[in-house]
Every structure is written in C-alpha cells, then in structure tokens.
Image (cartoon, coloured by chain):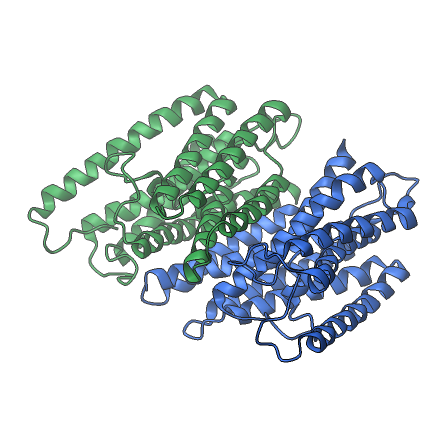
Chain colours: A green, B blue
Amino acid sequence: MSQPSPSSPAPTLSRKRVFFTRLSSTLGLWAVMGTGIWMGNTTVVLTVAVLLGLAGSWEYAKLTRDDEQPGFARWGLLLSTAYWVATLVWYARHGEALPFAADLLLLAIGTQGAFLLCYQHQLEGAATLRRIFTVLFGWVYTVLLYAFLPRIICLPALGEALPPNGIMLLLFVVMVTKFTDMGAYAFGVLWGRRKMIPHISPAKTWEGLGGAFVGAFLAASCMMALAGENLAPLTWTHVLILAPVLCLLGVTGDLAESVIKRCIAIKDTGHAFPGIGGILDLTDSLLFTGPVFYFYLEFLRRA
Amino acid sequence: MSQPSPSSPAPTLSRKRVFFTRLSSTLGLWAVMGTGIWMGNTTVVLTVAVLLGLAGSWEYAKLTRDDEQPGFARWGLLLSTAYWVATLVWYARHGEALPFAADLLLLAIGTQGAFLLCYQHQLEGAATLRRIFTVLFGWVYTVLLYAFLPRIICLPALGEALPPNGIMLLLFVVMVTKFTDMGAYAFGVLWGRRKMIPHISPAKTWEGLGGAFVGAFLAASCMMALAGENLAPLTWTHVLILAPVLCLLGVTGDLAESVIKRCIAIKDTGHAFPGIGGILDLTDSLLFTGPVFYFYLEFLRRA
C-alpha cells in the first residue's frame, strides 16, 4: 500500500529497490521457516516461532524504553522469556500447547510486579501510570496475542487416524496474512492513488485494500488446492469465509502497529531484516489474524 | 493503617466516626454475602460476585473517563458486561467456571476493538496511546484479576465423596484479605506512628503492617478451626504458608489502588458504600490475593 513521499528524488528507482530488498528478506525468512515446515518437525517450527516472539518483545522494550526507570522494560522481558521457556518445556514434556492458565498466571504476576516496581520511586502521576500501562500492554500485544501462533503449531490431531496438522494450519494463516500484506503492497505501488486513511498511515490506498483481498483469496485458494487434505477441519467453504475475515484483520493489525509507531514517533520499529523493518513489522498483522484463526479452528474442532 | 491529617479539627472523634461507618458498611455487605453463603447456593454467591465485578468496571470507567472520546470507556464496559454474562450463562449450562480461553478471546477482541476505535480520529500521540492502554489495563485489572474470585466459587468438588467447597474457599480468601485490611487499619489507628511508604500512601505505617499480619493469621486460623473439614485441600500447614503470603499480597494490592488513585489524583474511587469508598476500594486487595490463592489451590488439587 506504500507510495513514495512527494520529496523523494527518484521515486521509481527507490520503489523498486525497497520492493526487491523487501522481497529478498521475505524469501530468506521463508527459506528458514520452510525448511522446518518441510521437515515436518514441530519442535523446530515451534522454536523458530518462539524466538521470533521473544525478538518481538525485545523490540517493543527498545521501542518504549524509559531511561529514567529501565526496570519496567526489564520486567516485561523477564516475563516474556519465562513465558516462552515455559512454552518450549511444556511442549517437550506434554506434547501440547501451554494451557491458557499460564497466560493468566503470568498476567497476574506481571501486574503485581509492575506495581511493586513503582513503589520504589516517588509517584509521578501520569508518568507512573504510563510505565505500568506500557509494560502490561507490551505483554498483551507482543506475548499473549502472538502466542496464538505457537498454539496453532501445537494443535493435536483431529482424530486417531489423522496426523497432527498444526504446522500446515500455521502455514495457512501465515500465507493468507502475508499475501494480504504483499497484495496490498504490490497493488499500492502499482496503482495506489486514492488514500484510504491518511491520518493513520499516509501510504495506505483503497487500491491497496483491493490488492489485499486478491492476495488473501489467492493464498487461501492455493493452499486449499495444494494441501487441502492436510488442512482439516478446513474445507472450501471455510476458505470463502476465512479469506476476507483474515484479510480485514491483517489490514487492521498492520494499521495498529502504524498507530503505535506514529504515537511513539518512530518510523521503523527496528532493522532486524533489511526492507521489512523490525520483527513487529513482520508480525503485526499476524497478531490480529492469529487469535481469530485459532478460535475459529477450535470452534470447528469442537462442533 | 490510616491516621488523621495534622489539620484535622477533632482527630479522635473523626477517627471514631470513620471507623464505625466503615465497620457498619462492612457488616452490611457481609450480611448480604453471608446469606448467600449460609444458603450454600453457588448461583446466588456467584451472581453477587459478578455484580460486584461489573460495578468495579463501571467505577474504573468513571475514574478514567475521557470526555473527548468516550467510546473507549464504553468499549471497556461492553467487554466486561459480555464477560460477566458469559460467566453466568456458562455456569448455568455447564456447572463450572468459564474456561480461561474466554479471557484470552475477549482480550484479543478488546485489543482489536480499541485500535479500531482510534482509527476514527486524528492520532494524538501520547493521548491516543493512553486511551488504548487505559481501556486494556482496565480490562486486566477490573475483570481478569477479579475473575479469579468467581473461579474459586465454581471450583468442582475434590472427589466424588466430597461436596463442592468453592464458596468456603472463597470465604477463606475474603476473610484473610479483609482481616489483613482491618488489622492494618485498627493497628494503624491505635498505634500507627512510623510511616512505611509515605511517597505512595501517607497513612500507611509499620504498626499497621504488623496489624495486617495479626489479622491475616487470626482469620486463617479461625476459618481452619471452625470449618477445616470444608476447606479441603487446605490443612494447618497451608494456613502457615498462606496467611503471610496473602497478607503481603493484600497490602500490595491495597497500595496498587493507592498508586492508581494518586496518579489520577482522586481521593476516593467512588461512594458506593459509606466509609469504605468505592467498589474498587473494597476489592483492591482481593485483586492481588485472588489469583495467587486460585493457582495455589489448583497446584494442590493437581499434586
């Protein structure tokens, strides 16, 4: 959905460079993830997902750093690390996702710890509240929302006759979400003209939104056509429901990170991958599609 | 732990009046709750607990009201109402507590909705982030932390030979927490001299903290002596562990609400009960003791 700023000296060249850098970073990441998926090794895929999650929390801590009282950011990172270690240990011992109770336990401990931290200092009104709220929002945004992706990976088999297909279901939601992003980006670069929501993200255009829908349907249909038998309980009907829903959630999630970035007044959240920006730029839309896809699957599995 | 301010005209009279108003409010509340407990009717106790929870969310929304964009507070209230209705319906249909998955589902929907709300307006940097963070913190503080009390009420029986004892276990944690508060208050009023944490709450004294421990041990021991057989899996050993732990958590939770109040610069959070202040003044320490007590019980039950 990007388009060059009016002051850009050589818009076409710059566009192309950004596009190809972005493409190669994406392909590089897919190569790593793809190897794990190809091997069908849940532990490998889960570990990669967990490391990305941890990197996201790290980036959030850097983004919201408060040099006056760095203890809050450290507390957030300690909680995230504890959560991800627990996820890996639990999977190794029980072969399933960490129970939701763990999310709530760490949320309670996290809240109590954030208050204990602020008892050490003189209260500073809005600044003190901001510190507490920032660490808790970071936990919700970078850990609890992200954690649905590892949960999808760990989904048990639907029946005794079927193998576990969590990795393929993860691939489905990642593909649909990423093709939403890429479709929006490609259509935006090629034909983007009418601005959609200039007060939030000036580069987003209605043409880009059209591209997002095309990308989502393309990815969902290809996945279903190529690997339909491994996507149980999803059928073609679900493709028709999920593609537009995940597309809209992906766009919303992408905008959400724009809001956070613009409110903290930072253009890119990080520089972990050239052309993509930081980890949160990579995962932003998945933070919104992941939870809804997970609950959609759980609803189908129980129905 | 309170002590009169130096400018108070008739400290002893004022102290006494506050003390007796507070006592009668507490007794009144206990009368309502006690009737439900006496009847041993889980639905009645659960409904009272749910109504108090909803009132707490309502008070938080009033406390953090932002007249420029009231949509955020309304969104928080809508989520809370949905959660508490779901809790009652789930218990009526399944006879057990709402699964933790529901907490996470509503947390995800709540986050997405908060971002959708801010897309409607021009971004205002820190103010926009504050609105999002405030609604999410309110959800965590007044709903997710509080929800452990209804969860304790709904705990299933430990074995087939035993009746469900969730109400008695709730009574245990409420008694220990409230006697912590009352012990602290009584010792503070009578002997309070050395200030404990003047930059957070000027009325808290070390003598009050001593009273908190006395109150907690007294309540836990009385409960165990009078109703020990209904408190399974708790034994006297657990009383020795739980009394100091719940006491410290209760004091921390009480301070946490002081932090929120002082940072928003409001003396009392509400006036629902004379002498006690608002609902959040009533539940503040339970928000910290409830989750830890619940997980302690779950750990024992599974061990």
Q: Is residue A137 left or right of residue B91?
A: left
Vertical placement of residue B155 versus B4, above or below: above
Residue A37 is situated, as x and y percent measured from the top left of the image, at 44, 25
Q: Nearer the viewer, residue A254 or A170?
A: A254
In the rendered image, the residue lying farthest to the left is A9
Identify the residue at horizontal 15%, vertical 54% (top origin). A5
Q: Nearer the viewer, residue A261 or A178?
A: A261
Identify the residue at horizontal 28%, vertical 34% (top origin). A273
In what quadrant of the picture does the C terminus of chain B appear? top right
Report whether residue A230 is seen. Answer: no
In the rendered image, the residue lying farthest to the top is A39
Q: Nearer the viewer, residue B274 or B136?
A: B274
User: How many numbered discs sit on the rendered protein?
Assistant: 0
Q: Nearer the viewer, residue A147 or A301?
A: A147
Residue B59 is situated, as x and y percent measured from the top left of the image, at 59, 69
Q: Is residue A190 left or right of residue A217?
A: left
Identify the residue at horizontal 39%, vertical 42% (top origin). A61
Q: Is residue A131 left or right of residue A98?
A: left
Residue A109 is situated, as x and y percent measured from the top left of the image, at 58, 44
Residue B132 is situated, as x and y percent measured from the top left of the image, at 44, 59
Vertical placement of residue B138 versus A87, above or below: below
Occupied quadrant, residue B280: bottom right
In what quadrant of the picture does the N terminus of chain B appear? bottom right
Occupied quadrant, residue A179: top left
Report whether residue A126 is seen. Answer: yes
